[in-house]
Image: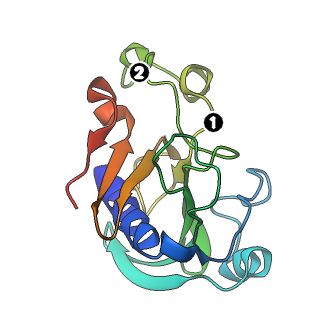
Amino acid sequence: MDRFVRMAGVTAVAVALSACAGAGRDFIRPDADSLKLGQTMYAQVVQKMGEPKTASEVVRNGKQVKSIVYSYANVHGQPLEQGVTPYRGMSFYFHNDTLVGEQFVSSFKSDNTNFDDTPVDRVQKGRTTRAEVIALLGMPSASFIAPMVKQTSSEVIGYNYQAIRGGLFSGLKAYIKTPRHCRSRLTPAAL
């Protein structure tokens, strides 16, 4: 899951760099029920979301995957935390034009992806069910199926919160919070 966090971190920094005057087209995260992994097609996502800000091709577990990104930042928007440039980003991943992954991250107060990390130590690999994880941490901000994860895995969920502090002249610092980083709370990311 760390590579997904790094990919999102790069996207967050790009958004933050363009955020000085407000950047991107604002969007609302689609309802969880409106897009289904393994069923929703590329054209359906573009119809719902509009043309993506960026598109690229990557290889995941030996398969070609198309990635599209939507992002929005506004220095005049209301962030979850003071001193943060609020932004939201949504990445979609497709294999053979079928949705195989999605990741949303936001530091806007209205739809932030911050999560309570205090119960993370109660999650036990191979024992804690998906429903129990969601009960502990809340709704996930990401979900992936093969080939984004190994073929032997079922759907994988993830949690991610990012905050960009600073400015172009004072320097930008990205803070990333994922379950792996929870023990140290918000940790500066290597950019």
Decide which of 40, 137 is in the foreground and name it.
137
Category of crowding for the residue at label 1, using alpha-carbon neighbours closer than 10 angstroms: few (below 14), some (14–19), many (at least 20):
some
Q: Is residue 12 above or below residue 154?
A: below
Q: Is residue 4 left or right of residue 140?
A: left
Q: Residue at image x 29%, y 34%?
A: 181
Figure quadrant of the C terminus = bottom left
**x%, y% of residue 92?**
56, 68
**x%, y% of residue 111?**
67, 46
Decide which of 158, 187 is in the foreground and name it.
187
Disc 2 designates what residue? 120
User: What is the three-letter code of the residue carrying label 1?
Assistant: Met
Disc 1 designates what residue? 139
Point out which mark residue 72 bears: none
Q: Is residue 191 above or below residue 42?
A: above
State which quadrant residue 188 falls in.
Answer: top left
Say whether residue 145 is visible. yes
Category of crowding for the residue at label 2, using alpha-carbon neighbours closer than 10 angstroms: few (below 14), some (14–19), many (at least 20):
some
1 and 2 marks in contact (CB < 8 Å): no
Q: Residue at image x 37%, y 66%?
A: 13
Q: Residue at image x 64%, y 57%?
A: 77
- Helix, strand or loop status at disc 2: helix
**x%, y% of residue 158?**
48, 43
User: What is the three-letter code of the residue carrying label 2?
Assistant: Val
- Total count of labels: 2
Q: First in sequence: mark 1 or mark 2?
A: 2
- Helix, strand or loop status at disc 1: loop
**x%, y% of residue 114?**
53, 37
Decide which of 187, 134 is in the foreground and name it.
187
Q: Is residue 172 left or right of residue 142?
A: left
Decide which of 57, 104 is in the foreground and name it.
104
